Image (tube, rainbow, N blue to C red):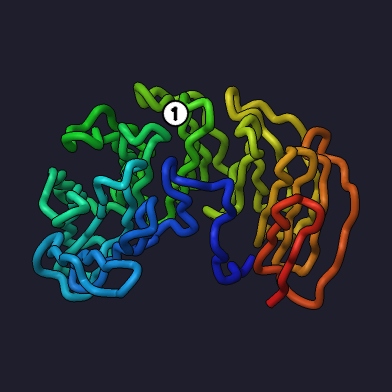
């Protein structure tokens, strides 16, 4: 199957304190809306005053590579610290990689700590709900849990192979599990506190791309589609399959939206179909067709209507 352009991730896929709409977000707004942090080439992070656009400070994250901007930027829940991941290198791809994750004080951009990744690039970062742990997905296939306070490593989980720049994190609302997709053809769930594996789905059964899964509003279920077009609901706690819905052999999810009451799941596909499913049972409520791929799917705040846009 040909892979369509990657749409923004749905709101259910968040990186803890920040709503990360992209795996590689290189800009973020502070929680109070006062500052905008922007990553630019060559490996520089700047803080802009949101009201005026004036630069408050600018810091070089690492030296050398003129081709790369920070791969991910996010702030602590209290807005006091900004975290940035950067990877440079002397060769194409990840050859000669020099990865670093830095924590900077928001006020003046002063360094709080730096964590060097040696021969790996940090593709994506996310925070635990309490802001205590920073999760770092790397090109070497390692998931690191780093202390947000001092940059020390709490635990490491090995995916087992080199990973492309595809990582998606979901921190469950119960704060006990981190569910992630790392481009290795498997969906992983690990314990937030220890890094111990809870369950793994795949290969073959896992979603074929990082945007092919989402979560229910309460975080109790994870929804994903296999490469054969089978939409599955699994229990976030155990990985047990709750139900399966057949989208069709050529179907590829392109946009998701979950009703705030947890009753209905809306799924738009690259084939232009908008499915409305009962979230508990997996049965179809209705099906709508569009002339082309559905690229976004958004619910009105009161949940009374869903807005879907096709390409």
Q: Position of residue 77 (x, y in %)?
A: 36, 42
The reply, left or right, for residue 16 in relation to residue 161 is right
**Residue at left offset 57%, top offset 65%:** 7
Q: Position of residue 173 (x, y in %)?
A: 53, 31
Total marks in image: 1
> Is 115 drawn above or below residue 306 in the view shown?
above
Which residue carries the number 1 mark? 190
Task: Indicate the quadrant where residue 261 lies.
Answer: top right
> Is 164 drawn above or below residue 153 in the view shown?
below
Task: Indicate the quadrant where residue 255 lies.
Answer: bottom right
Q: Position of residue 127 (x, y in %)?
A: 37, 40
Viewer-closest of 298 and 79: 79
Viewer-closest of 119 and 77: 77
Q: Seen from this angle, which residue lies furthest right?
A: 286
| One can see residue 162 in this view | no
The reply, left or right, for residue 172 in relation to residue 106 is right
The reply, left or right, for residue 202 in relation to residue 93 is right
Viewer-closest of 166 and 307: 307
Q: Position of residue 8 (x, y in %)?
A: 54, 62
Disc 1: CA contacts within 10 A as few (<14), some (14-19) or many (>=20): many
**Residue at left offset 88%, top offset 47%:** 284
**Quadrant of the rendering where the N terminus is positioned:** bottom right
Q: Label 1's element?
A: strand
The reply, left or right, for residue 154 in relation to residue 254 is left
**Residue at left offset 15%, top offset 44%:** 115
């Amino acid at each position: 199957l040909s892979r369509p352009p990657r749409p923004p991730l749905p709101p259910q896929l968040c990186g803890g304190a920040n709503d990360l709409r992209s795996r590689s977000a290189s800009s973020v707004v502070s929680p109070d809306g006062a500052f905008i942090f922007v990553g630019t080439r060559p490996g520089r992070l700047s803080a802009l005053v949101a009201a005026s656009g004036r630069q408050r400070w600018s810091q070089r994250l690492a030296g050398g590579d003129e081709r790369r901007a920070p791969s991910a930027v996010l702030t602590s829940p209290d807005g006091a610290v900004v975290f940035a991941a950067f990877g440079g290198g002397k060769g194409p791809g990840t050859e000669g990689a020099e990865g670093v994750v830095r924590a900077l004080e928001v006020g003046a951009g002063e360094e709080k700590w730096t964590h060097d990744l040696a021969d790996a690039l940090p593709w994506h970062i996310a925070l635990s709900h309490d802001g205590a742990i920073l999760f770092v997905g790397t090109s070497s296939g390692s998931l690191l849990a780093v202390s947000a306070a001092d940059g020390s490593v709490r635990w490491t989980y090995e995916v087992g192979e080199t990973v492309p720049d595809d990582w998606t994190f979901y921190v469950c609302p119960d704060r006990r599990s981190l569910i992630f997709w790392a481009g290795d053809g498997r969906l992983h769930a690990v314990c937030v506190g220890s890094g111990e594996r809870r369950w793994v789905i795949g290969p073959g059964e896992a979603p074929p791309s990082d945007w092919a899964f989402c979560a229910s509003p309460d975080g109790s279920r994870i929804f994903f589609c296999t490469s054969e077009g089978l939409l599955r609901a699994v229990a976030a706690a155990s990985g047990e399959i709750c139900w399966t819905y057949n989208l069709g052999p050529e179907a590829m999810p392109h946009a998701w939206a979950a009703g705030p009451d947890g009753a209905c799941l809306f799924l738009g596909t690259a084939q232009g179909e908008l499915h409305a499913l009962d979230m508990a049972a997996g049965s179809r409520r209705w099906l709508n067709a569009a002339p082309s791929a559905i690229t976004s799917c958004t619910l009105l705040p009161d949940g009374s209507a869903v807005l879907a846009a096709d390409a």
